[in-house]
Image (cartoon, rainbow, N blue to C red):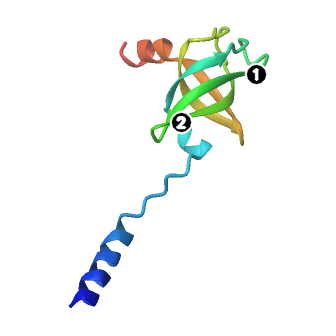
Amino acid sequence: LAFLVVAWLMQFLSRLNVDGTVRIERAIGSRGTVYLSIPGAGSGIGKVHVNQLDRTVEYNAITSQEQLPTGAKIIVVRIVNADTVEVAEAAEIERTTHA
């Protein structure tokens, strides 16, 4: 009987398996904050801290908008490469989606 309970418990626990790996592909739509200012019009790279899976992850970042200063609230809009994201100011995204 104990063997059956343990087997059932192990089977139940295996169904709870969740992939908690932070992957840049999952960053689109994530919110965060500018850590190192980002030059405007894609002219340079800054850094952002993004909240992903209840963790704070740091990515290189560009923006097609005007310069984003340190502390600005952002949303990830596109993946550029393996360690760089394109971001937009969160207030700008909210204005265009609620208009």
Badge 2 marks a residue whose secondary structure is: loop
**In terms of image quadrants, where is residue 43?**
top right
Which residue is depicted at the point 59% across and 46% down?
A: 23
In the displayed structure, would residue 37 be above or below residue 11?
Answer: above
Image position, residue 29 (x, y; %)? 49, 32
| Viewer-side residue, 43 vs 21 | 21
Is tag 2's residue or tag 1's residue first in the polypeptide sequence?
2
Which residue is depicted at the point 28% across and 89% down?
A: 3
Q: Nearer the viewer, mark 2 or mark 1?
A: 1
Q: Residue 64 vs residue 52: left or right?
A: right
Image position, residue 84 (x, y; %)? 70, 33
Three-letter amino acid code at disc 2? Ile
- Label 2: few (<14), some (14–19) or many (≥20) C-alpha neighbours in 10 Å: some
| Viewer-side residue, 96 vs 36 | 36
In the displayed structure, would residue 87 be above or below residue 18?
Answer: above
Q: Which residue in the structure is indicated by mark 1?
A: 45
In the displayed structure, would residue 31 be above or below residue 1?
Answer: above
Q: Residue 29 vs residue 38: left or right?
A: left
Image position, residue 85 (x, y; %)? 65, 31
* Quadrant containing the C terminus in the rendered view: top left
* Quadrant containing the N terminus in the rendered view: bottom left
In the displayed structure, would residue 50 be above or below residue 10?
Answer: above
Image position, residue 35 (x, y; %)? 64, 18
- Label 1: few (<14), some (14–19) or many (≥20) C-alpha neighbours in 10 Å: some
Q: Which residue in the structure is indicated by mark 2?
A: 28
Q: CA distance from mark 2 to mark 1?
A: 18 Å
Which residue is depicted at the point 49% across and 57% down?
A: 19
